[in-house]
Amino acid sequence: MKISRSIFSAAAIFALLAGAQSSAQQTETPPPPPPCSDEIFHHFDFWVGEWEVFGLQGKKAGENTITVEEYGCLLVEHWTAASGGTGQSYNFVDHASGKWRQIWVAKGATTDYSGGLNDAGEMVLEGTIGYPNGISAPFRGTWTLQGDGSVRQYFQQYDSAKEKWTDWFTGIYKKKKAAE
């Protein structure tokens, strides 16, 4: 009988432990979602990738790489112009304003602007461009996903003397073909 009591006691302890573990698993809260997983953080995903950029006449303007960093919270841009110049930007949702923001630096010039998707699904950012000589002006950028998967990037600068927006740069982004 001692053996059967021992077996019964061991079985009872095992059942208690299994029940306690099951109960603990049921009361655990699920882990929080990863940072920056809400829909707004994906509004600019259409720009992510390896690109060749062309002007409106079809001449290659440069190459651009846009990567997702920091758990999906940051898009990092690395631009190389066909002429050899470079530039970089950080693109993120500013938690204070709830808007997308881009900080761009190239050849000593800086652009700081913010905004978001318009009703047409275009990313539109507005702010200021500052040049190394101290001159600054209102600046606007619009990124539009095209039906063929390319992206149209359209920049305008405000001309206060003429009191109108003027074209600054238009580029057509075409995905780089994978190496064979």
Image (tube, grey):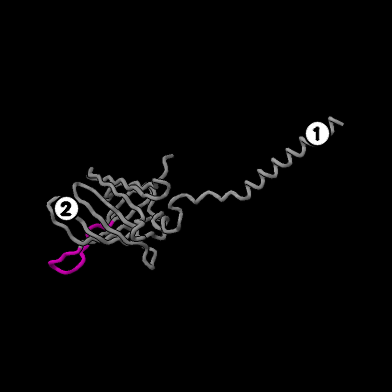
Which mark is in front, 2 or 1?
1
Q: State the image coordinates of residue 89 (x, y, percent, origin top left).
A: 29, 49
Q: Quick one: label 2 or label 1, which is nearer the N terminus?
A: 1
Taking the view exactly as shown, the residue that stands out farthest to the top is: 3
User: Could you tell me which residue is drawn at 26 percent across and 51 percent down?
Assistant: 104
- Residue type, numbered disc 1: Ile
Q: Mark 2 points at which residue?
A: 131
User: Could you tell me which residue is drawn at 45 percent across and 56 percent down?
Assistant: 38
Q: Quadrant of the C terminus?
A: top left
Q: State the image coordinates of residue 163 (x, y, percent, origin top left).
A: 16, 69
- Residue type, numbered disc 2: Tyr
Q: Name the residue under label 1.
A: 7
What's the magenta bit mostly, secondary-structure-wise? strand
Indicate the quadrant where residue 177 lies: top left
Magenta-tinted stretch: 158-170
Q: Which of 45 and 26 is in front in this view?
A: 26
**Left or right of residue 2, residue 130 in this image:** left
